[in-house]
Amino acid sequence: MTVYTVDLRRVLDMQDDQFYELCRTNPDIKFERNSRGDLVIMSPTGGETGNRNIEIAGEFVFWNRQAKLGKLFDSSTGFKLPGGGNRSPDIAWVRQDRWDALTAEQKEKFPPIAPDFVLELMSPSDSLSDLQAKMREYLESGVRLGWLIDRLSRQVEIYRQGEAVETVENPVTLSGEAVLPGFELEMAIVW
């Protein structure tokens, strides 16, 4: 996936409603904004990454339907993070009581909430340092657990609130820990 970052701050102070309209007016383009307000433009993923994304998402859907503890979101969902960015994780999950606290309008647009869990699956063309910065932005906004998966190197970085990043080489499974109780991702579908 190719990513372009454009600093528009000197020429345009894009407000949240304007960003939302930009995304609605250009539905074929994936936009994000980082916490500095830079516009981030991303190309679609390739076939292998897209296939892995949907397989991983399926595991989360099955778990979430049984656990009934929250709401699950795909990569086309934008979140207005408390830290200022508008981000779209590959997979996001929000605890049900936190989701229910939002208004109908907030749920319909870009929900102004940090997910409890996020997952980013690295594409061959992604920059590791850019994704690591994105993961830090998630944590700074209140995300409790995040996984950055690099399937080519078979490495996972696990991000937790208040803890150092844990790097795991070639794990067999990943645990949802207390954030996603009872969830385990079998990594065979990722590698």
Image: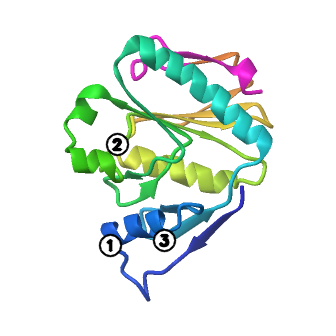
What is the three-letter code of the residue carrying label 1? Gln
Which circle, 2 or 1, is nearer the viewer? 1
Tag 1, which secondary structure? loop
Tag 2, which secondary structure? loop
Instruction: Name the quadrant of the C terminus.
Output: top right
Q: Which residue is mark 3?
A: 38
Q: Are marks 2 and 1 in contact (CB under 8 Å)?
A: no
What is the three-letter code of the residue carrying label 3? Asp
Q: Which residues are magenta?
A: 175-191
Which circle, 1 or 3, is nearer the viewer? 1
- Residue 33 x/y as whole percent: 47, 63
Which circle, 2 or 3, is nearer the viewer? 3
Does 55 appear above or below 26? above
Among the two numbered marks 2 and 1 on one chain, the one whose residue lies closer to the N terminus: 1
Q: Are marks 1 and 3 in contact (CB under 8 Å)?
A: no
Tag 3, which secondary structure? loop
